[in-house]
């Protein structure tokens, strides 16, 4: 595999280590050395050395020639969430919202043309798609994504949509560019976005932005319901007002946290 970056400070071996971690697919059976080499495009000796290194660090477990990720990999994502203070700040507000609505609530941020879930409080309901911290969905098909895309400048939107989705999820309806731009204008005017089974059958949601102390949108928060149980009228008439109030409270806490001296902010997060 040739170097992917001409920057002399770019460390290719670290990039290849992340390639191996990202190559693992869901499932308990794991991957063989050949599977990993094929999925990453690495030579087998290189893939073997990376797997041995990751195993020594505790990120990979190897049994009888099959390799699986360990829960330690979750630390990589949790470090980001904790460094942003998102979970500690938002958790009590999400828990209160879920108590009020009896529905799941999540926070997501943009990563390319996908949303990535960074915080979640869920209720035990069967829906078409499993969601957990780190789950990715195509942003244009989700209420969270529409809120986040609506905050981008035209140039930023072009760059974002030019990146292919890495979610592996095929949405039921992915709006074309002209349709999406109309939707985003509507989101900017209303301050919220809703979807009705666009991502997957049975999934309805409404989302609003979360802002930091400078007023900049840093994430989005939603309420998700099952279409067979909750109508759009209930979602928008009953849950949206509670969601807007929750977002205002979280944003106020973000602003208060941003106003603290850096050392203090790190202590309270």
Image: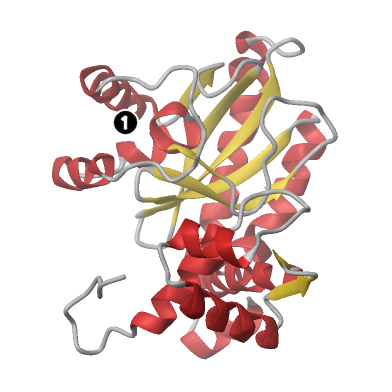
Depth check: give the residue in front, 264 or 119: 119
Neighbour tally class for label 1: few under 14, some 14-19, many 20 plus, Cα within 10 Å: some
Q: Position of residue 1 (x, y in %)?
A: 31, 70
Q: At 54% from the left edge and 46% from the top edge, which residue is drawn? A: 248
Q: Position of residue 22 (x, y in %)?
A: 53, 61
Q: Quick check: can you spot residue 73? A: yes
| For residue 54, above or below residue 243 | below
Depth check: give the residue in front, 82 or 17: 17
Q: Position of residue 196 (x, y in %)?
A: 54, 15
Q: At 60% from the left edge and 86% from the top edge, which residue is drawn? A: 53
Please state, as top left, top right, bottom left or bottom right, where the C terminus lies in the image.
Answer: bottom right
Depth check: give the residue in front, 178 or 230: 178
Q: Quick check: can you spot residue 253? A: no
For residue 41, what is the image quadrant?
Answer: bottom left
Q: Position of residue 4 (x, y in %)?
A: 25, 70
| For residue 152, above or below residue 119 | above
* Residue where numbered disc 1 is placed: 188
């Amino acid at each position: 595999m040739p170097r992917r970056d001409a920057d002399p400070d770019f460390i290719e071996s670290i990039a290849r280590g992340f390639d191996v971690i990202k190559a693992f697919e869901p499932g308990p059976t794991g991957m063989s050395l050949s599977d990993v080499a094929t999925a990453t495009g690495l030579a087998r000796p290189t893939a073997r050395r990376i797997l041995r290194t990751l195993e020594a660090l505790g990120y990979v477990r190897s049994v009888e020639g099959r390799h699986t990720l360990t829960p330690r990999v979750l630390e990589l994502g949790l470090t980001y969430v904790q460094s942003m203070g998102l979970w500690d700040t938002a958790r009590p507000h999400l828990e209160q919202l879920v108590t009020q609505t009896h529905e799941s609530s999540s926070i997501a941020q943009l990563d390319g043309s996908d949303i990535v879930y960074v915080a979640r409080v869920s209720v035990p309901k069967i829906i078409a798609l499993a969601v957990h911290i780190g789950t990715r969905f195509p942003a244009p098909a989700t209420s969270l994504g529409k809120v986040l895309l609506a905050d981008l400048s035209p140039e930023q939107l072009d760059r974002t949509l030019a990146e292919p989705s890495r979610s592996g999820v095929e949405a039921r309806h992915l709006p074309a560019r002209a349709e999406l731009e109309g939707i985003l204008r509507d989101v900017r005017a209303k301050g919220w976005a809703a979807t009705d089974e666009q991502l997957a059958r049975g999934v309805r949601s409404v989302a609003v932005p979360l802002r930091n102390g400078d007023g900049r949108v840093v994430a989005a928060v939603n309420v998700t319901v099952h279409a067979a149980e909750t109508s759009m009228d209930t979602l928008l008439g009953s849950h949206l007002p509670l969601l807007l109030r929750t977002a205002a409270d979280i944003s106020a806490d973000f602003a208060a946290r941003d106003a603290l001296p850096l050392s203090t902010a790190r202590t309270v997060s």
